[in-house]
Image: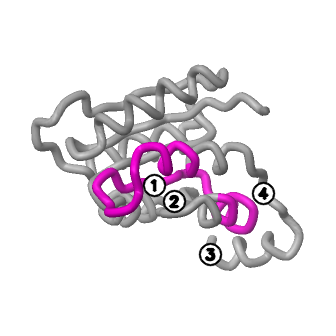
Amino acid sequence: MTSYKISIASDHAGYLLKAKIIEALQSQGHKMFDLGTTGDATVDYPDFADLCCQHILDEESQFGILICGTGTGMSIAANRYSGIRAALCVSIYMSERARSHNDANVLVLGSKLPNIDDEMNLAIVDKFFATSFDGGRHIQRLAKIS
């Protein structure tokens, strides 16, 4: 498996899941940049999406992971940046397609979604980083987005 530099950030709703993901990805040899938050004190998710996206755009990391309660807010905030392709994934299939078809560089997760526990979120993360971009016909589609 390829080793990546990954920036990860969350709001207060996602900090516990963030810690589990960091531990799992570090054990696989990835270099992790924890951009916060570190507790359950209320924070504003756009601030943490900004930190993560800037890390990627400044080429300090290759990929990012953002986590909030539903993932929706982080996804909206991240996709405002040119060059960021953030995908909110709630299944392993979505995670695989986000990488193979959309060349997503930010994985967004919801920490409080019903029927998606930490184990499933970790499987979604694993699939995301085990999948590469297919290229081919998808290149012209991504060009239209840019």
Q: Name the amino acid, label 4.
A: Phe
Q: Give the number of the mark in front: 3 or 1.
A: 1
Instruction: Give residue 145's mark.
Output: 3
Q: Is residue 130 above or below residue 21?
A: below
Above or below, comparing residue 76 to residue 109 in the picture: below
Snapshot quadrant of residue 108: bottom left
- Residue identifier under label 4: 133
From the viewer's perspective, is 113 left or right of 84?
left
Asked if the residue under mark 1 is in contact with the one under mark 2, i.e. CB atoms within 8 Å, the reply is yes
Judged left or right of residue 43, residue 26 is: right
What is the magenta range?
Answer: 96-124
How packed mark 1 is, by other alpha carbons closer than 10 Å (few <14, some 14-19, many 20 or more), is many
Q: Which residue is mark 2?
A: 86
Q: CA distance from mark 3 to mark 4?
A: 16 Å
Residue at x-position 37% and y-position 66%: 76
| Residue located 30% across and 43% down the image | 14
Check if mark 2's residue and mark 3's residue have beta carbons within 8 Å.
no
| Quadrant of the image containing the N terminus | top right
Q: Specify which label sits upstream in the sequence, 2 or 1.
A: 2
Residue kind at label 2, given as amino acid type = Ala
